[in-house]
Amino acid sequence: MEKRRILVVDDEAIITRTLKLYLEGTGSYEVRTENEGSHALQAAREFNPDLIMLDLVMPDTDGATLASEFRGDSKLQNIPIIFLTALVSKQEVGAQGKEIGGHPFLAKPVDPEKVVECIEEQLQ
Amino acid sequence: MTTRSSYPAKSVPPRALALSVASLAVPVVAALAFPGSLGELGVMLWLLALVPAFLLAYYRGWWGVTLACGVGMAVLALTQSVAGILGRQIQEGPLFFAVVVIYIGIALGIGWLTDRLSVATGRKQIEEIRLRLVKALETMQLGVTITDTNRKIIFSNPAEARNHGYTVGELVGKNVGIFAPSGKLKPLEKEELKALSSWKRESINVRKDGSTFPVQLTSDVVLSASGDPIGIVTTCEDITERKERQKQLERATRELRKSHGDLQATQMRLIEAEKLESVGRLAAGVAHEVKNPLMVILTGVKILTQHLQDGSGDIRVLLDDMTDAVARADAVICGLLDFARPHDFELVPEDLNTIVEQSLSLVKHEMDKSHVTLAKELAPDLPKVNLNAFKIQQVLINLFTNAVHAMPEGGELTVRSYSRPVRQLASNPNSVERENLLTSESDVILEVDDTGTGIPEDKLAKIFDPFFTTKPTGKGTGLGLSVSWQIVEMHGASIEFKNRDEGGVTVTIIFRSDAGE
């Protein structure tokens, strides 16, 4: 079966590195990581992912802005997005239910098995 | 003070003394002028004793003595005269006789005149004093009444009459009980009066129109010169204003004391809130920084677990422990954040008893495990309270769990709910007193009793402090009560912990319900 392509964007390299390790360890995914929010759009265009994981708060930009940029890109607009965040209050992340702007979000620290579950849900 | 009458007081006037001395001089001069009479020194001395005694008695008003002295002197003179007329040996010459007669005449005349003069002057002075006294009494703003021992009014000043709505004329002759709510006053026995002597009291007096007013009365028994009670003088001060001021002062003091208490309580709450708020802010900052590393550890542990060979059981246990440790650290941080951001909840009218039941069902397992029995005393028809069911459930589970932990050897958990109407101090402009008015609000009270070990008094003040815990390390985050306190505060309710006399702790939460809704 063809591996699904996941782009993980988070300013913390240790997060992207361990997630890549875990997800690729499952044998189902090919992961590209990006630690600069401002490079995320370019990286997505190059990598052409099946799904994008976005950290909500980054030094140079934020997940919500990036998500709207992806939506504005004809090539990327239909790619599912999962938010990851270290913020906790729903008000802080502007969440409604379990979604932010229609995208699911996962609060760190999250069990990577749950991450996989969420990815699979979004890919279906 | 007993008043002993000093009128009419008598004392020897200096001029009486002078007259006595002068009366001595007259016979001495006479004896010197007529040496023949010196032989009659005995008679002379007698005269010398009689005359001053006569004069002294005359001025003191001892009329019997005066008369005796006068008659004595007259008899002496007469005897001398008769002896002379009869041609007997006239012991004294006619001159002496004449001198004695003249002398007695002069002495009597001077004595009489002086007496008349002195009485007239005395009367005039006394009359003047009496007028002044009466005038003074009439001018006084303080009411004065003098009664006889039968309590009959013999004098009342205009102030007294005015204060009671009478004229002076209406009062004289009446029983002084006319002023008392109880009516007529009984006459007092002499001995009673003597024993009373003087007395002060606050009382209520009645006006002619039946209205009453508070008075300060001071009575003194008046004694005659011989020490017998002859009446009572009473001053009567209208103390309506004083009483009113006293009441105002008492009210002000009461209000001041209450506001002081409120202020202190508010200050304590502010300090507490500020303390919790700053911990919350700090926690929020720390939480964000800690959550990323926790995520890395959790993911790392999962990766390591996947790479484990069969048979490496110890390592698997270790990795599971690490997963648990991450979960625990996350729980602490979530607790702190809960604490930092308790504001995002809605309040809706809920039945407190329902929430109590739900919360109890969630801790039932733990209670059974610890052999804790449950006693429910939930009042039916509790007014609904505006609250967030989820948050209050969080508080209740916290309280129940704490109670169960305080009874490791088993015990009884009592959950009680009831309501009571709220009374509020409201001022009524028509009344001096503030009145307790019922409002449409009621307090809905929840009490949780345990039969555990209680909380040491020195730790009671700290129980709401974040991270304060008496539980063993790892058993509690020390945030449960801090969060509970904050949730309760956000509901405008209060929470209080008290050690029970019979052991254990009572937690009281008081919600305010507006039954008018």
Image (cartoon, coloured by chain):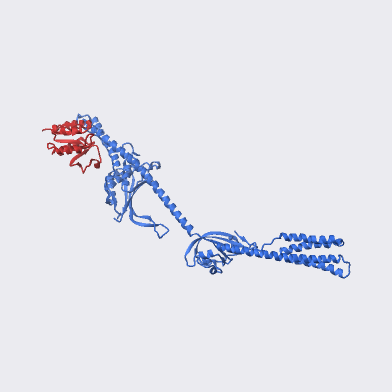
**Picture quadrant where residue A104 is located:** top left
Residue B56 can be seen in this image:
yes
| Numbered label tally | 0
- Residue B82 lies, in percent from the top left, at 85, 70
Q: Is residue B284 above or below residue B228?
A: above
Which residue corresponds to the image point at 48% horizontal and 58% vertical from the top-left?
B241
- Residue B433 lies, in percent from the top left, at 42, 58
- Residue B340 lies, in percent from the top left, at 30, 41
Which residue corresponds to the image point at 12% horizontal and 36% vertical from the top-left?
A75
Please name the color used to draw chain A.
red
In the visual, does B75 lie left or right of B271?
right
Q: Depth check: B291 or A43 in front?
A: A43
- Residue B375 lies, in percent from the top left, at 32, 49
Q: Residue furthest left?
A: A1
Q: Residue furthest front?
A: B33
Please name the color used to draw chain B.
blue
Q: Residue furthest bottom?
A: B86
In the visual, does B149 lie left or right of A67?
right
**Picture quadrant where residue B453 is located:** top left
**Picture quadrant where residue A54 is located:** top left
Give the quadrant of the C terminus of chain B.
bottom left
